[in-house]
Image (spheres, rainbow, N blue to C red):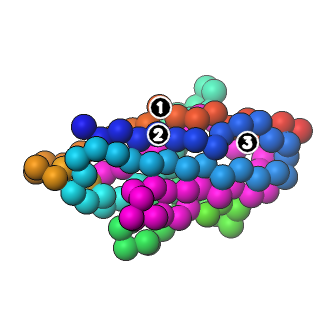
Amino acid sequence: QVQLVESGGGLVQTGGSLRLSCTASGSIFSIYVMGWYRQAPGKQRELVATITSSIRTNYADSVKGRFTISRDNAKNTIYLQMNSLKPEDTAVYSCNANGRYERGGIFNSWGQGTQVTVSS
């Protein structure tokens, strides 16, 4: 019932920047928290950053100081500004949202993911 669509991935060189976006749509009453996760080849999925409805943020140590997550509540959209990219950042980045449906119940939805590749 809730769909997430990511965009902004691509191929960049080491030290470059990208901005990812994720928009949630559907019968949404409220979104409590949205976040970005990533999965690199041969590795488990890991949390990158989260942001709550009150705009409180949390970052993985590996991206702290380089990535910035932000949120536009009116648009049900989050962004991930990625600076000083490293090859280690190469992964499929997926958007996640947790909240309440308009007609009751909670949801935990995932987007399809967008590929970020950082080359040297």
**Is-magenta flag for residue 82?**
yes
Q: The residue under label 2 is which amino acid type?
A: Val
Q: Residue farthest to the left?
A: 104
Q: The residue under label 1 is which amino acid type?
A: Gln
Residue visible at 63% across and 33% down? 115
Element class at badge 1: loop
Q: The residue under label 3 is which amino acid type?
A: Glu
Q: Please say if the residues under marks 2 and 3 sit with CB atoms less than 8 Å apart.
A: no
Label 1 vs label 2, nearer the camera: 2
The answer for how far apart the CA atoms under marks 1 and 2 are is 7 Å
Tag shown at residue 78: none
**Magenta region, main secondary structure:** strand
Tag shown at residue 112: 1
Residue identifier under label 3: 88
Element class at badge 2: strand
- Above or below, 65 against 115 in this view is below
Residue visible at 45% across and 55% down? 77
Label 2 vs label 3, nearer the camera: 2
Q: Mark 1 vs mark 3: which is more N-terminal?
A: 3
Q: Please say if the residues under marks 1 and 2 sit with CB atoms less than 8 Å apart.
A: yes
> The N terminus appears in which quarter of the rendering?
top left
* Label 2 crowd (10 A; few <14 / some 14-19 / many >=20): some
The answer for how far apart the CA atoms under marks 2 and 3 are is 24 Å
The answer for how far apart the CA atoms under marks 1 and 3 are is 21 Å
Foreground pick, 22 / 61: 22
